[in-house]
Amino acid sequence: QLQASGGGVVQAGGSLRLSCAASGFTIDDYIIGWFRQAPGKEREGISSINSSDGTTYYADSMRGRFTISSDNAKNTVYLQIDSLKPEDTGDYYCAAEINWPPLTVAAIMDPDFIGMDYWGKGTQVTVSS
């Protein structure tokens, strides 16, 4: 399973580091992605990582302020969010898809991709102006 944490209430311009801790499987066998859903909006993909080789992917609209990373020893994937804006407010989720047959990191960010193996419960981020 996956457990996302690290959300909270922050002022615009601040930073947060979200964590996605995996249990029951090893993250380097999976592609892990971060997604978010703002109030009243559809879920959107942020970034994904193949922690076995460090390959990362960022959605075009997410480049610059978001940084994904992993710590295989801790079996955890992180999402650093800098220069937070009120429009970053929402629920942030992590998800995992086994990397067999091999996938590109971008594959799980495709809105048409279905069948993620694991979804974590979201962690809420609220950015005040």
Image (cartoon, rainbow, N blue to C red):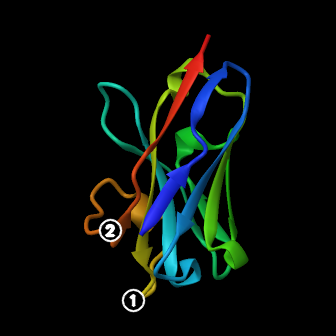
Instruction: Assign the N terminus to one quadrant of the image.
Output: bottom left
Q: Which of 111 and 5 lies nearest the eye of the viewer?
A: 5
Please name whichever residue, 60 or 126, is drawn nearer the observer in this view of the structure: 126
Q: Could you tell me residue 77's position as x and y percent?
A: 62, 63
* Element marked by disc 1: loop
Residue 26 quadrant: bottom right
Could you tell which of marks 2 and 1 lies nearer the N-terminus?
1
Residue 66 as seen in the image, left or right of residue 60? right
Q: CA distance from mark 2 to mark 1?
A: 14 Å
Residue type, mark 1 in image: Pro
Q: What residue do we see at 65% from left, 24% from top?
A: 10
For label 1, the crowd category at 10 Å Cα-Cα, with few meaning under 14, some 14 to 19 and many 20 or more, is few
Report helix, strand or loop for mark 2.
Answer: loop
Q: Residue at x 73, y 26 (%)?
A: 14
Residue 30 placement (x, y as % from top left) = 49, 78
Quick check: can you spot residue 82?
A: yes
Mark number, residue 109: none
Where, by quadrant of the figure, is residue 119 drawn? bottom left
Q: Which residue is mark 2?
A: 116
Along the viewing direction, whichever of 128 and 31 lies nearer the viewer: 128
Q: Specify the quadrant that holds the C terminus.
A: top right
Could you tell me residue 57's position as x and y percent? 58, 60
Residue 101's label in the rendered image is 1
Return the residue found at the far top.
129
Amino acid at dot 2: Met
Decide: marks 2, 1 in contact (CB < 8 A)?
no
Local packing at callout 2 (Cα closer than 10 Å; few below 14, some 14-19, many 20+) is some
- Residue sitting at the far bottom: 101
**Residue closer to the observer: 13 or 5:** 5
Give the vertical position of 113 relative to 97 (above or below): above
